[in-house]
Amino acid sequence: MSVLVLALLGSFIGDIHRQALAANTSSNPSTDTSGGSSGGVIWSGVQSGTPPTGGSSGGSSCTWRMLVTFDSTIGRTTNISRVVDGIRYDLYERRCGSVFADVWIPRLSPSQVARSAALLVQARLPSPTVSFAPSSASMVVNVPNWYWVDASWWTPVTATAWIPTAFGPLWARTTATPVRLNIVTQDDGSPLGNELGSSSCVGPGWAWDVSLGDDAVSPCMYEYRHASTSRSSGTFLGLIGVEWRISWTSSTGAGGTLPSHTTSSFFVNRVVELQALVG
């Protein structure tokens, strides 16, 4: 397996765990996020979807009540809590009609709830499908190649997470906004070479059309330096990535930015070197 493949696959490992945990809730809003941890934050009991209003959960018949017990040491009732890995949890009762369950809810800051919402939004982001002109099967050395992705999904994606508290729901909403295309591709003239080429541009790129003519220039272009004929496959392997900027707001008025996220997919290009006759 080539060095490029190893490097590109390695870049995915950090996201696989987070996306798998979030995927269970991306299609089922207003449910418990199943539990897990990331970066020291445990989100068991964090809810996704619309936070409750007026004691209900997202317009359903679900209600939340913090459970208490009498503490003879202090002579009064107190909430039932426990500490796990440095995070304090309070025990709540969730009632949905005639069905009820006890759920441990972590005491989280708005930024921590936002990190749970970021896991949800990352699981909803589409992976890009790249187009080229000239096409992937007919590229030529030293000729600028246009690349672009479908602009119809180049729009922000949002997700909301929340937890019940004694003072009402605490929610955080994250928004992932696509900002940049990044390409990394093999581009080396030797069979075992591992030199890479790269290109980056802001936006989804422009779709090429014959009416634009051969001299048109796109903000998203890459020019191969070598032919892919030196490879046993006769092609170059590459990766197209969309960089998403993630911001958040919350019910407390706090907000900010979180680390960006990239969705990626592979492509395969055939690049040849044209031969010219000089008379």
Image: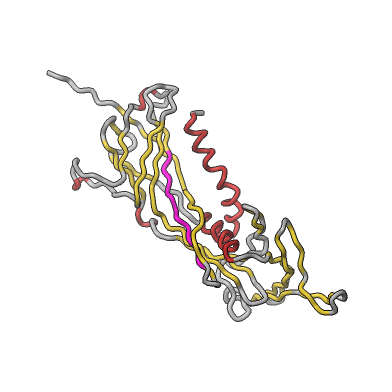
Residue 39 % position (x, y) = 62, 52
Q: Nearer the viewer, residue 43 or 95?
A: 43
Q: For this view, does 76 lie left or right of residue 43? A: right
Residue at image coords 78%, 75%: 78
Protein image colouring: secondary structure
Residue 132 % position (x, y) = 32, 41
- The image quadrant where one finds the C terminus is top left
Asked if one can make out residue 27 in the rendered structure from this viewpoint, the answer is: no
Residue 9 % position (x, y) = 52, 38
Span shown in magenta: 239-249
**Magenta highlight on residue 107:** no
Residue at image coords 59%, 68%: 162
Residue 98 % position (x, y) = 71, 76
In this view, 2 is above or below 181: above
Q: For this view, does 259 lie left or right of residue 226? A: right
Residue at image coords 77%, 64%: 82
Q: Magenta stretch mostly in which secondary structure?
A: strand
Q: Quadrant of residue 217?
A: top left
Asked if one can make out residue 237 in the rendered structure from this viewpoint, the answer is: yes
- In the picture as drawn, the residue positioned furthest to the front comes out as 74
Q: Nearer the viewer, residue 144 or 277?
A: 144
- In the picture as drawn, the residue positioned furthest to the left comes out as 279
Number of dots carrying numbers: 0
- In the picture as drawn, the residue positioned furthest to the right comes out as 72
- In the picture as drawn, the residue positioned furthest to the bottom comes out as 54
**Magenta highlight on residue 244:** yes
Q: Quadrant of residue 111?
A: bottom right
In this view, 267 is above or below 116: above
